[in-house]
Image (cartoon, helix red, strand yellow):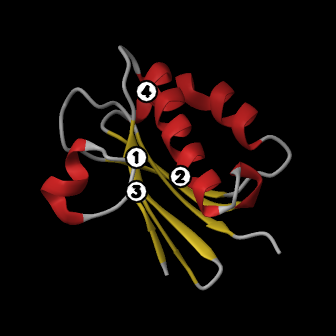
Amino acid sequence: MKRISSGGEFEAKVGYCRAVVAGGWVHVAGTVGQGEDVAAQCKSALSIIEKALSEAGAGFSDVVRVTYILPDRHEFEACWPTLAETFGDNPPAATMIECGLIDPKYRIEIEVTAFLPD
């Protein structure tokens, strides 16, 4: 098993790491990003996720499941172009949940699961 840390402020406070590689799977924790609006935060979160996937030996084409968590579901549509570009021809199974996040400044949290390529 391999644990990957991004050094995010909540990792030490809460007691988790950005990703865990186990049994051929990469489990990436819910990830928020920085920015003034949901679209910028979405891009930022995906960048952090991409780094964790890369360190694990995977990429977005290996993602099999993604969960989007937003405090306001009406903001989700602003992220669609970025998500379509990110996952392209390899779309994962997806779920979108509306609920509060750890801090009101965050507009989206993204969690992914990937299967390591052979």
Measuring from the top left, give residue 61's x and y in whole percent.
Answer: 77, 53
Q: Are marks 2 and 3 in contact (CB under 8 Å)?
A: yes
Residue assigned mark 1: 31
- Residue that label 3 marks: 18
Q: What residue is rendered at 56% in x and 45% in y? A: 51
Q: Let me know if residue 7 appears in the view.
A: yes
Give the residue type at disc 1: Thr
Looking at the picture, tell me which residue is in the foreground, 4 or 27: 4
Q: Image quarter for residue 13? A: bottom left
Q: Which residue is mark 4?
A: 41
Query: Considering only order in the chain, which callout, 3 or 2, is on the residue closer to the N terminus?
Result: 3
User: In the rendered structure, are the residues bearing label 2 and label 1 in contact, judged by CB atoms less than 8 Å apart?
Assistant: yes
Mark 2 neighbour density, 10 Å: few (under 14) some (14–19) many (20 or more): many
In the image, taking residue 103 as reference, residue 39 lies left or right, namely right
Residue drawn at (20%, 64%) of the image: 15
In whole angstroms, how far apart are the C-alphas of marks 2 and 3? 7 Å
Q: Earlier in the sequence, mark 1 or mark 4?
A: 1
Alpha carbon separation for disc pair 3 and 1: 8 Å
Q: Residue at x 23, y 26 (%)?
A: 105
Location of mark 2 (residue): 52
Instruction: Give the CA separation, mark 4 to mark 3.
Output: 17 Å
Q: Position of residue 68 (x, y in %)?
A: 47, 47
